[in-house]
Amino acid sequence: MAIDVKKVSKTYIRKEENFTVLNNVDLHIEDGEFVCFLGPSGCGKTTLLRIIAGLEKADDGEVYDRGELVTGPSKERGFIFQQYSLFPWLNVLDNVMFGLKLNNKSSKAENLATAEEYLKKVGLSEFKYNYPHELSGGMKQRAAIIRSLVNHPPILLMDEPFSAVDMLNRHNLQDNLITLWKKINSTILFVTHDIDEAIYLADKIVIMDKNPGRIQEIVEVPFERPRQRESEEILKFQDKIEGKLAQWEL
Amino acid sequence: MDINKKLLPIILPAFLIIVWYILTDAFYIIPAYILPGPINVFSACWTLFASGKIMMHTTSTLIKVFLGIIIASVVAIPLGIILGWSETLDRLTSLIISILRPIPPISWIPFAILWFGIGLSSSVFVIFIGCVFSVLVYTIDGVKRTDKVLIEAAQTLGAKNWDILIKIVLPSALPYIVSGLKVGVSIALMCTVSAEMIASSKGLGYMILTASQLFQPGTVVVGMVIIGIIGILFDYIFRKAQDKIFW
């Protein structure tokens, strides 16, 4: 068992009003799974991801990462943010090596080799001496993903990482991510509000409930990889998921 | 077009020098005891150069400015990082800082003389007071403006508190720190001259004051121009540094 969420609750106070974002959530995620959290903004999916990461504290309940209680952020759980999060004062190569240098386990030459290898995998070798402001949105997210992956995190948490990228680039990034994921065997938890994205990427889709802060249903995605983007089966499945989400429209 | 851009800033000063020359040395419209003419100033400049006095006073002023800024940076940058990082410490000290900050550095001169006597250290103290607060306040501001996402990104990459302070907060506050230094240096330059007029026996401020007492208006103008040039140089250096740092 990779991640175990036990009775997690979280309430925000905004303008003296209570907003329950998570209400007694239980969730189990197996090793090596690719799980998408689907729901519109404000349904608590990002908060749940941040609590799993240790970036936020739950009011109640606990999160266990492979049996250990999560008390704060750790390099065991990589996190890809929706906003661009590369360090603007470092070039791409130094950004990617940030974690390697911190953990100081390997020599400088080894770090460099690892970073170069990952840069090549996502097609950023040519841009390793460029600074983040010189990159496109898609390139920034690619660099942020490998910056996390060079640490070999057993868990990778991704919070709508491709939402700011145009569609063509988003498809490329999704394919890139699947290829990387197969090589590294991490467990990926991926938050999105895009049904197509969830169906293309996930083994399982966690659908958040309208009743605030609950999980409505967990749906298995029955398609083999590499997946089609627009086959009849997929469209049917898409309708099914949309039906489950229809309650949100009310 | 390009020549125009480069010439444009020089036109006005050149015109003013010509007007100055016409009013004074050429037609004696304004008597020399009210405003010395350019010839008077250049000859004063020449004498000061020949005797080596100008170099001595300029170096003395520059050394004080540098020492003042360096000590202020050594105190204000680490302190600013700590205060910007810890909300409790920031609240604890904010009232004191906002009370001390607007006090003109020159009003510290009596204490400077009491504590350090006449000479280098009392001037340096006044310069320190003059720029420490701007560097401190800018550093605190820069630290507070650190993008939270960058801190969280570093945490999920394995960074602990100390790494975050050194590798994230410091570089992200650096542009603000440089702005603070830039403001600090211009204040420091003003303080130096005032401090030297009272609590020193060397430096451009001292040179200006003694020249005015000995009725040498040419020397006074030379001192003023040199201070202006030092100001431009510092401004240039910091602008270059900012170009490199602002990403």
Image (spheres, coloured by chain):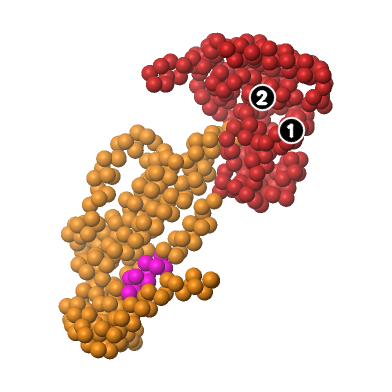
Chain colours: A red, B orange
Image quadrant occupied by the N terminus of chain A:
top right
Q: Which residue is mark 2?
A: A194
Q: Main secondary structure of the magenta part?
A: helix
Q: Position of residue B144 (x, y in %)?
A: 42, 40
Nearer the observer, A129 or B165 = A129
Give me the disc on residue A171.
1
Residue at 41% x, 54% y: name it.
B179
User: Residue at 48% of width from left, 57% of height from top?
Assistant: B242
Give the structural element (helix, strand or loop) at label 1.
Answer: helix
Image quadrant in which you'd find residue B150: top right
Q: CA distance from mark 2 to mark 1?
A: 12 Å
User: Which chain is indicated by disc 1?
Assistant: A
User: In the figure, A166 relative to B9: above or below?
Assistant: above
Read off the chain for label 2: A
- Residue B88 showing in the rendered view: yes
Region in magenta: B225-234
Residue A204 spot, x, y in % from top left? 71, 17
**Residue A44, percent across and down?**
55, 19
Q: Is residue A92 magenta?
A: no
The residue that appears at 64% across and 13% down in the rendered structure is A246
Q: Nearer the viewer, residue A111 or B132?
A: B132
Q: Which mark is residue B215?
A: none
Report if residue B166 is visible in the image: no
